[in-house]
Image (cartoon, rainbow, N blue to C red):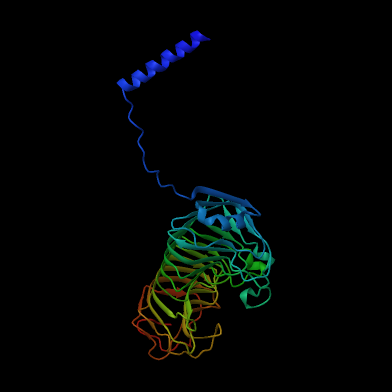
Amino acid sequence: MMHTNLVQAALLAFSAASCLANPVAPPQVTKAASLDKRATTCTFSGSNGASLASKSKTSCSTIVLSSVAVPSGTTLDLTKLNDGTHVVFEGTTTFGYKEWEGPLVSVSGKRITVTGASGSVLDGGGARWWDGEGSNGGKTKPKFFYAHSMTSSTISNIKIKNSPVQVFSINGATNLNLNTITIDNSAGDSGGGHNTDAFDVGSSTGVNIDGATVYNQDDCLAVNSGTDITFSNGYCSGGHGISIGSVGGRSDNTVDTVTVTNSKIVNSQNGVRIKTVYGATGSVKGVTYKSITLSGITKYGIVIEQDYENGSPTGTPTNGVPITGLTLNGVTGTVSSSATDVYILCASGACSNWTWTGVSVTGGKKSSSCKNVPSPASC
């Protein structure tokens, strides 16, 4: 024992001497790095995925929704996301049945990216609500996807199937891009689908919809108000065409600079359409339809009318919502023999400064009811 103590004492003495001979620099004290409080990726799935995602949404920089089953009467609430959040849909997202207004999904925020993984689908199960009434009566049907108050954001590669009623509601958006969106409500053609608008745009600026494929039973695009709206490279089947309006009777009644290009409208009631509300005020200016191909149109190839009241035409146009600076360039195609090629119903002096080039719509009847058609347009 004594020998061991002597050895330990000697070692301690040697160590102390070494430290004095070669003093060690004190450790550097540095400020801790600032850590992102949000987890990199949060994955949610199953029947509690929607509620957990809604509760945890501000703690995640990437939200993965993997085969989420959203309970009935519940919104998949992704509103007020942190700036730059990325949302990914994987697998099949489903929604429980309840009669209510919806929406089934709601997203808002700045610099948000919403994408669909390969093979993913948001299935609304619309047949449970479809009764041929749409939003006009019968069962109360939930709207599908609110893209409200989205700024400098992108929604891409999303497939939506069998929406109960209207699909995308875009409102209060600024610089929002929707790329390669597929909306397949084709089952509603024989199943009672109605008012299944694909994209309804209001009070928004800088909305760009590119490469959409739509099978539905109402407007492929309806711009009720907004500025700098673009719809390009689209395919619209089975619905009511690509529409401006109806404009008037809302809090925002201005449509300015809308461009629809390189798109096909097939097997639809109408091709291109502009409708304004009887007795209302507002304005429609700078609308362009360019390189539009029509086929299988059953009602109107081109229809522009200023006489809508309660969603139906009156036959009497009013001048409170003038349509100015309209351009139709390369709008061509065919309508059915019972349809009308072109129908224009303007109030006196309320349609002006139009450009009409390369327009050729054939196969149907010539209208005898056109009024105040501005040159160089023709019925």
Quadrant for residue 288, please give it: bottom left
Quadrant for residue 23, please give it: top left
Furthest-left residue in this view: 21
Residue 295 relative to residue 258: left or right: right
Where residue 26 appears, x then y in whole percent?
34, 32
Q: Residue at position x 32%, y 29% from top?
A: 25
**Between 273 and 131, the one nearer to me in the picture:** 131
Tally the marks: 0
Q: Residue at position x 33%, y 26% from top?
A: 24
Where residue 358 appears, x then y in whole percent?
37, 72
Residue 303 relative to residue 357: left or right: right
Q: Residue at position x 45%, y 76% from top?
A: 225
Residue 244 in sight here: yes
**Between 193 and 157, the one nearer to me in the picture:** 157
Residue 159 relative to residue 286: left or right: right
Where residue 205 appears, x then y in whole percent?
40, 70
Furthest-top residue in this view: 3
Furthest-front residue in this view: 2
Where residue 62 appears, x then y in whole percent?
50, 51
- Quadrant where the C terminus is found in the figure: bottom left
Residue 140 relative to residue 62: left or right: right
Residue 302 in sight here: no
